[in-house]
Amino acid sequence: MKAHEGMYIAGAWRPAAGEDVLEVVNPADEQVIAHVPAGTAEDVDAAVRAARAALPAWAATPPAERAARLAALRDALAARKDEIAETVTAELGSPPAFSQAVHVGLPILVAGSYAELAASHPFEEKVGHSVVHQEPIGVVGAITPWNYPLHQIVAKVAPALAAGCTVVLKPAEDTPLTARLFAEAVHEAGVPAGVFNLVTGLGPVAGQALAEHEGVDLVSFTGSTAVGRRIGATAGAAVKKVALELGGKSANVILPSADLVKAVNVGVANVMSNSGQTCSAWTRMLVHRERYEEAVELAAAAAAKYGDRIGPVVNARQRDRVRGYIDKGLEEGARLVVGGTEPPVARGYFVRPTVFADVTPGMTIAQEEIFGPVLSILAYEDEDDAVRIANGTVYGLAGAVWAADDAEAAAFARRLDTGQVDINGGRFNPSAPFGGYKQSGVGRELGAHGLAEYLQTKSLQFQER
Ligand code: NAD
């Protein structure tokens, strides 16, 4: 077991203010694999001061130089990709191939996309007799979840640095080791001291201190709607900018003309990926009444094949929460076709891939985010009914539509109250804006839209000549 020391503040690993530590547990075998310091308000204060001190010089650094540091960061992450993938597997439980391809591959792409954007973004534009400057918002407090530990960090830190902001990161308590590797990569990339700072610790202690700190100009949070609501309220009271990426309950709508086999198989794979711990997962499959039983059979077969190929969920609390939802589904009359609460193995926080049929829109499992490998299949009568069901939750993060042609699917997608929709299996695009309608959040991440979250505008009016 490894004891990691210190917080990364002002360009160096410094001793934590307190003595408390967090245990890092491997969810596949329940063994403690490391300890990291549990930060306090004092650590957060030191980190925010460092970020504030570094702000003027970094904000004034030419975008081309910021782009060069981001390109170096991308390369430093790429050079450590095996170590990062192994670390994600150890602390999150993700299967090694998925860690390599997604948990490390995606953030490298995102870091690269911001190296390009920092170099090419027009930070200045002419509007009539005005020149509008896009300036960094200031010090960013970034609070991230464990489900995609590196991606969630890079999706905030890379655009913030591209914009000229400085950052204090408080990563999730379950996955602090990946965050420490990220800090090492930032250091290797030659990012100036204080531009990026890391404080590990508990949400209600270090996270809350960061969200409440008056030296923070923007709080960028990804996590649960419950915590996001509190952070939004705190930021609102301080008249501080806030970006929130919260939960989801996305619909995968299979229109009657669709290739049912493909739509169901891709849909099941989407839900089982990362053991269901993806906020944008299509956890509700909507199928026309006439093809419903056929879809249920296909989904059951597809999910059964996953059997022992999915990893555990992140911790015991999450496993119990997911099992609680499976019990609730049974209690409310849904039909369990695959999976259930029975543990598949004796040790590790595993949940069996689970599929429910005969789910109705009002059921708890059709409304609340489960964040585990559980799919609900619902029947609709016609297109209007499908739109009503798809839009009938408090969330609006993602979704999918399948039809015989893209135009038909896209026309339906335009009726969905959600931030992104995959058309006939369209691939995730790391440069397209990602974020929620309704209670799924405020603001957007990724690409140029993600960069805009970290910029504020200043208009200079000149005399008209
Ligand atoms: P969480 O809200 O419990 O924790 C997220 C982060 O907030 C962690 O770093 C945690 O330490 C911190 N935190 C907790 N309490 C805090 C407080 N009082 N003040 C400040 N910070 C606090 O969520 P989680 O369990 O880590 O993640 C799962 C949730 O995140 C799911 O609901 C999921 O949908 C959501 N999520 C959303 C997105 C998205 O992009 N919309 C992405 C990933 C996860």
Image (cartoon, rainbow, N blue to C red):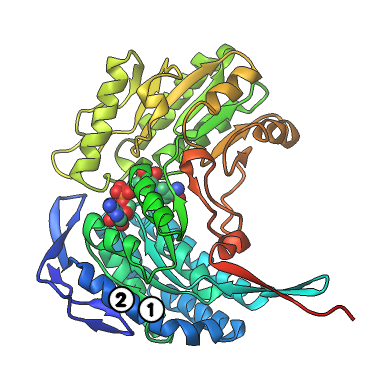
Image height check: is 399 above or below 228? Answer: above
Pointer 1: what residue?
A: 51
Asked whether 418 or 211 is in front, the reply is: 211
Q: Which mark is residue 410?
A: none
Q: Is residue 15 left or right of residue 196?
A: left
Please identify the quadrant where the N terminus is shown.
bottom left
How far across and how far down the image is residue 12, in percent?
28, 85
Q: Is residue 125 left or right of residue 32?
A: right
Residue at mark 1: C-beta within 8 A of ligand 1: no
Residue at point 43% right, 38% down?
A: 271
Within the image, what quadrant is residue 207 found in? bottom left
Element assignment for label 2:
helix
Observer able to see residue 274: no
Within the image, what quadrant is residue 330 found in? top left
Crowding at dot 1, Cα within 10 Å, few <14 / some 14-19 / many 20+, comes out as many
Q: Which mark is residue 47?
A: 2
Q: Amino acid at mark 2?
A: Ala
Residue at point 52% right, 37% down?
A: 266
Image height check: is 211 above or below 321? Answer: below
